[in-house]
Structures are given as structure tokens and as C-alpha cells.
Amino acid sequence: MVKTKQLYEGKAKKVYATNEDGVYIVSYKDDATAFNGLKKGTIEGKGSINNRVSNHLMGLLHQSGIPTHFIEELNERETAVRAVQIVPLEVIVRNIAAGSLSKRLGLEEGTKLKTTVLEYCYKNDDLGDPMLNEYHIKAMELATEDELAIISSYSFEINKILSEYLLDLGIELVDFKLEFGRADDGSIILADEISPDTCRFWDSKTKTKLDKDRFRRDLGNVEDAYKEILKRLMGV
Ligand code: C5P
């Protein structure tokens, strides 16, 4: 399989078309951004860690019956995935108050939420990814009612599978972001990545942050946190 054309370059990844029909290659970068691109930097080794962590977790979800875009890890930084049309939504799942939820609702970071909270944001950099509810999504035809039902049900299921798996490894899944895509048969499948860039991972005993908040908040030891996640998940 060879890359033919670069289709997209985002903050943390590039996506290429390939000579195989319906297959893209995702290439993970070490670049890091936060606050909608206002803060920029590099996290050494991040690309290869996120590639492996995301593929590992996608594999776990696949075994549990969640359809994902993952096909095959090609090398340290690159993965073959099913070509999809991305649904322009960021689906945020929250178990514990942190980040923008704490700020918006005045909830102390670390407060366990009584029920899992699902939020949708409109994937639009120019608008700063504003939050949406289901009415906005239907009114703007970003997803159909059926697609939204599948997306929310997969999101809760993914949360259950990942939370239980990670807790066994001493990691609390505080919150995370998912993106879904439409495959060529029209079905909804999990796309994008699941990594320390897109999840809040806390050590379950010490509550140490093992994710991108170390970069966002200048907490130091960013690379070590990413490596620790890789080590707990894959023993390397
Ligand atoms: O910033 P906020 O608290 O809303 O983030 C919630 C979760 O979604 C965090 O785990 C964060 O890493 C993730 N997220 C993301 N990409 C965004 C916004 C949030 O991965 N554009």
C-alpha cells in the first residue's frame, strides 16, 4: 500500500489517500496544540505513542463489538484506516468533572458525576468548536436522528469498556473525546484517535494527570506521562 495524496493536515495528524480503494493512512505528528491552536509545542515521541495507544484501544473496542476505522498498524507513526466521511461532531464523554465542565458549571475538578455526561461540539475551528445539543445537530443536518442514536449508544458503551479496562491498570478515565465517521456503506464507525491527547487519564491512587493537561497547563513531565500510559497499556 502506498500513499497517493495528502487529504488533510490537522493539529496532530495527517491523513493520506492510498492506492487501495477505501483505505486511508493516518500519520501521527509530535506537534501539540491547545486552546484552539493558541498554544503550540512539540511533545517528543507523542506521535508514535498516540499511534500505538489508539490502535491498542481501538482493538479492544473492536473485540467488544464496536465498529472502528482501524485496519492495520503500518509502522511507529502510521496506521491504515477505513476511509470515512467524518461526522462534524466532537462527542465528549465525562465521568468526573474537569476542564471546561468544571469551569462552566463551577464544579470542583475531581467531583464524581452522578451519571455519565455526554456533550456534543460542532467541529469548526473558525467558531472555536461550540457546544451543540441534539436540536442544533438535527436543525443543521450534521447527523440524522438514527445516526445520533447510534453515536450516543456507542459512546456510552465505549465509556464502559474503556473505564473498566483502564481502572484495572490503575487509570481513571475522567473524560474523553470521540469522533465518528460514515463508512462507504453508510454505517457509523468510530474514527479519529483515543490517546492521551484526547482523554483525561488520572492515576487512580495519586490522581496524577497522565495526559495532555500536563502540556495545556505547563505541569512538566509531559513526555513521561505519555510514556507511562503506553507502559501501563502495553508493558513497553
Ligand atoms: O476541554 P474539555 O474539558 O471540554 O475537554 C474534555 C475532553 O475532551 C478532554 O479529555 C479533552 O482532551 C478532550 N478534547 C479533545 N479535543 C478537543 C476538545 C476536547 O480531545 N477539541
Image (spheres, rainbow, N blue to C red):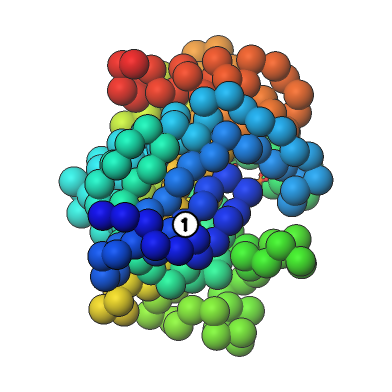
* Secondary structure at numbered mark 1: strand
Task: Please state if 167 lies on the left or on the right of 136 as rendered.
Answer: left
Q: Quadrant of the N terminus?
A: bottom left
Q: Nearer the viewer, residue 204 or 178?
A: 178
Q: Quadrant of the C terminus?
A: top left
Above/below status of 216 relative to 191? above
Residue 176 percent across, percent down from the top left: 52, 44
Above/below status of 22 relative to 128? below
Residue 67 percent across, percent down from the top left: 26, 59
Task: Please state if 112 lies on the left or on the right of 191 as rendered.
Answer: right
Residue 13 percent across, percent down from the top left: 53, 48
Quadrant of res 220: top right
> Residue at point 48% right, 42% down?
28
Residue with the mark numbered 1: 15
Q: Nearer the viewer, residue 157 or 61?
A: 61
Residue 207 appears anywhere in the view: no
Residue 158 percent across, percent down from the top left: 36, 49
> Residue at point 26% right, 78% down?
185
Q: Nearer the viewer, residue 112 or 57?
A: 57
Indicate yes or no: mark 1 CB to ligand 1 under 8 Å.
no
Residue 36 appears anywhere in the view: yes
Q: Nearer the viewer, residue 33 or 190?
A: 33
Disc 1 marks a residue whose amino acid type is Val
> Residue at point 49% right, 71% down?
87
Label 1 CA crowd tier, 10 Å (few <14, some 14–19, many 20+): many
> Residue at point 58% right, 56% down?
9
Quadrant of res 22: bottom left
Above/below status of 184 relative to 113? below
Task: Please state if 4 lies on the left or on the right of 186 as rendered.
Answer: right
Above/below status of 218 relative to 81? above
Task: Report the number of discs.
Answer: 1
